Each structure stands twice: as structure tokens, then as C-alpha cells.
Image (cartoon, rainbow, N blue to C red):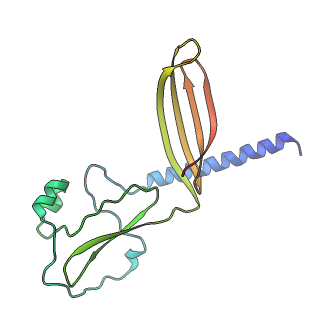
Amino acid sequence: MDKTKIIMGMIIGLLLLISAAAMKAWYSERNKPVVSQTEYINVPQIKEVTKIKRVAVSGPKEIVTIEKEKIVDKLKLPNWVAENADEQVIATAEITPYEGITDTVATLNTKTGVGNIIAKQRPLSLFAFENKKEIGARAGYTTEEFEQLITIFGRWQFLRVGNVHAGLYGEGNSAGEAIGQIELTYRF
């Protein structure tokens, strides 16, 4: 088998992989649930839990809540919480950033009336299509003739296998040079 056929096969395989990643990224982006960084929203339930029947249990005479006026002011909670006397805050949590999904559950101790939130991060799958895009610019000076150099770059990571991320990288600079590369990175 000659080298040309092997190289063409590798290029076709890579193009198929990139196409699959692009289609997955497009579909995921289009169907992504809305998450707000500027205001509080109701979040979707854990899929497996939506199929479980709801039951009524007897509870305490009182439920321990966090002083509403102060927490509304401190956390800038929305009006739909602040103005609704039936909507009380029983627990809060701060969840650190994570690439995967974090499942959270609110619990209520029916003897004490105290609420808590428990959380568990789902482990990342071994293989995943990603859609991480980055664009930027750099400015500095070269070592040759101490000339100013401006570089514009872009990166698209579309595949993750374990901690290895694959993608495309490109850049161009004010010296008229351009680079296009396949990128592999390992994150730890």
C-alpha cells in the first residue's frame, strides 16, 4: 500500500471525526438548557428523578428557614422569591466549577425542620465530543531586530478521551506568517 493512500485514509478519518464533533457541538448548543449568570432561575431536575412518584410524609410543626429579608438582600434573590410568602429559603450551597454535571438534592429533616443541600459530581465519561472555542490576540516584541509583533489566534477543542483533548489551532501575525495545526493537550 503506498503512502498516499495511508495519508488520504488518515485525512478522511480525521475529517469524519471533526464533522461528527461539529454536528454534536451544533446539536448540543442548540438544545442547551438556559443557565443564567445574572439572575437566579429554576434548574431542571435530575432526569432519573422525574420518573419517581411523589409521596406526602408527615412533617414537623415548624420548618427552620433562613431570615428572608436578609438573604434576599445579601444574595440579590429575584422578586418571585422575595415577594412570595410561600417561597422560603431553607438551605444554600456553593458548588465549585466542574466540567461535568453536578447533581444536587435538597433534603428536609422531618423531626427538626432543618433543610440541607447535598451534591455529587458525576464522573466524566472516558470519551466525549466537546465544543470549546477560544479566540484571542497577543502583542509583544521579537528577539530579532526588536520589532513589535501582533498575533491573532483561534482554538477549537472538539474531542476528549480521558484527560487528552484534541482540537484545531490557528494563528496569524503581523509579520505575515500563518499557522494551522492539529492540537493535542493533556490536562491534569
Residue lying farthest to the top in this orientation: 145
Residue 46 position within the rendered picture, expressed as x and y whole percent measured from the top left? 39, 70
Residue 134 position within the rendered picture, expressed as x and y whole percent measured from the top left? 48, 39
Residue lying farthest to the right in this orientation: 1
- Against 129, is 122 above or below? below
Q: Residue at x 58, y 37 (%)?
A: 169
- Against 30, is 87 above or below? below
Residue lying farthest to the bottom in this orientation: 58
Q: Is residue 53 left or right of residue 146?
A: left
Judging depth in this view, the residue of 158 and 104 nearest the camera is 104
Q: Is residue 163 left or right of residue 91?
A: right
Numbered disc total: 0
Q: Residue at x 59, y 57 (%)?
A: 162
Residue lying farthest to the front in this orientation: 143
Residue 82 position within the rendered picture, expressed as x and y whole percent measured from the top left? 13, 60
Q: Residue at x 35, y 65 (%)?
A: 44
Residue 188 position within the rendered picture, expressed as x and y whole percent measured from the top left? 54, 52
Q: Is residue 139 left or right of residue 85?
A: right
Q: Residue at x 48, y 21 (%)?
A: 140
